[in-house]
């Protein structure tokens, strides 16, 4: 399998806080890669570097064969339509209805699909993928936490991205809703053939969804392997994740 994302020797500090200190990662086509790391270890920073929201101090990031540091704003925008990003939390626009939230990326990224006269079919298809067609005219404050996550996922899916980045998709949800979200992520991968990076510290989520895992410890890709490999490791720092 070809890598669709390649991160080499990524370094990022904030003052004297050396968050990423030589981090390496490859995302292979079609896989679910789980990245685990304790709170504050730099998982979100890594993801933000990957989509150009943070500038790395050094290192290279290639997305679909392109070094993102060499892209101009237009090209970066184009790559962003291929990389769906679910922020930690759901980050819906509270003043917009579900429909308007989903239309937003279509209106913003007109290059990929052109100007769409009638967005309804695309909006409804994306809502169907997350099982929430009936919520199309609701406002975010009328949605539960789990529904918000699903709508946020629908908003990402509407651009038909090749890569989806999930930052803590199950955090703050009850176990049953978490399972629903995990199932949904698996269905999305099957239906859209996406490659995903899933940031989580939910061991159950990792067990179910990971084709491969990377542990981010001390700013580096400290350990890599399948869930079985890592959960059976004798390394103290690795063991700490699976207690
Ligand atoms: N814009 C910023 N300015 C200064 N420090 C930052 C900034 N963004 C992140 N940091 C610091 O970088 C470190 C890593 O933050 P990050 O958000 O990546 O952690 P995380 O691994 O995602 O944690 P969590 O599991 O709690 O989400 C933290 O110490 C944080 O304070
Ligand atoms: Mg984070």
Image: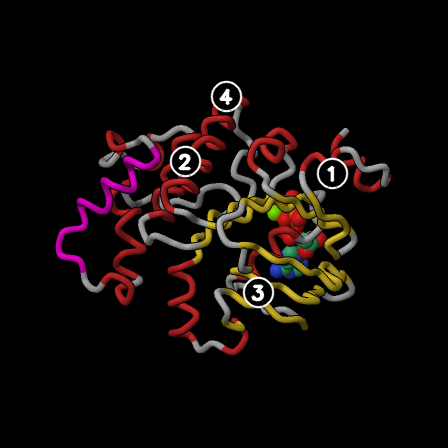
Magenta residue check for 121: yes
Q: Classify mark 3: helix, strand or loop.
A: loop
The secondary structure type at the circle numbered 2 is helix
Q: Secondary structure at mark 4?
A: helix
- Between the C-alphas of marks 3 and 1, the distance is 32 Å
| Side of 144 where 38 appears, left or right | right
Give the mark toward the camera: 2 or 4. 2
Q: Which residue is mark 1?
A: 229
Q: Nearer the viewer, mark 3 or mark 4?
A: 4
N-terminal label among 2 and 4: 4
Choose the circle earlier in sequence order: 3 or 4: 3
Q: Nearer the viewer, residue 216 or 42?
A: 216
| Mark 3 / mark 1, whichever is N-terminal | 3
Against 158, is 234 above or below?
Answer: above
Bin the neighbour count of mark 2 within 10 Å (Cα to Cα): few under 14, some 14-19, many 20 and up: some
User: Which residue is farthest top?
Assistant: 176
Q: Is residue 218 magenta?
A: no
Task: Identify residue for label 3.
Answer: 54
Alpha carbon separation for disc pair 3 and 4: 34 Å
Give the Cα separation between the discs numbered 2 and 3. Answer: 30 Å
Residue for badge 4:
176
Rendering coords of residue 204 (x, y %): 62, 29
Task: Please give the range of residues in magenta.
Answer: 116-130
Mark 3 residue CB less than 8 A from any atom of ligand 1: yes
Q: Earlier in the sequence, mark 2 or mark 3?
A: 3
Proximity of marks 3 and 4: CB atoms separated by less than 8 Å: no
**x, y (%) of residue 125?**
25, 41
Circle 1 or circle 2, nearest the eye: 1
* Location of the C terminus (image quadrant): top right
């Amino acid at each position: 399998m070809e890598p669709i994302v390649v991160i080499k020797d990524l370094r990022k500090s904030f003052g004297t806080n050396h968050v990423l200190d030589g981090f390496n990662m490859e995302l292979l086509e079609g896989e679910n890669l789980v990245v685990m790391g304790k709170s504050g270890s730099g998982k979100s920073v890594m993801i933000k570097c990957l989509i150009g929201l943070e500038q790395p101090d050094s290192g290279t990031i290639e997305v679909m064969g392109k070094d993102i540091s060499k892209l101009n704003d237009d090209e970066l925008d184009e790559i962003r339509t291929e990389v769906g990003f679910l922020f930690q939390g759901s980050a819906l626009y509270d003043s917009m209805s579900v429909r308007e939230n989903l239309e937003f990326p279509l209106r913003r990224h007109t290059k990929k699909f052109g100007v769409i006269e009638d967005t309804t079919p695309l909006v409804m298809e994306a809502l169907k993928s997350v099982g929430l067609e009936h919520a199309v005219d609701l406002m975010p404050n009328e949605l539960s936490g789990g529904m918000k996550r699903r709508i946020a996922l629908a908003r990402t899916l509407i651009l038909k991205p090749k890569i989806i980045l999930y930052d803590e998709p199950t955090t703050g949800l009850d176990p049953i809703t978490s399972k629903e979200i995990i199932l949904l992520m698996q269905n999305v991968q099957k239906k859209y053939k996406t490659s995903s990076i899933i940031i989580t510290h939910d061991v159950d989520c990792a067990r179910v969804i990971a084709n491969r895992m990377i542990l981010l410890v001390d700013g580096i890709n400290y350990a890599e392997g399948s869930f079985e490999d890592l959960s059976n490791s004798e390394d103290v720092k690795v063991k700490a994740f699976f207690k």
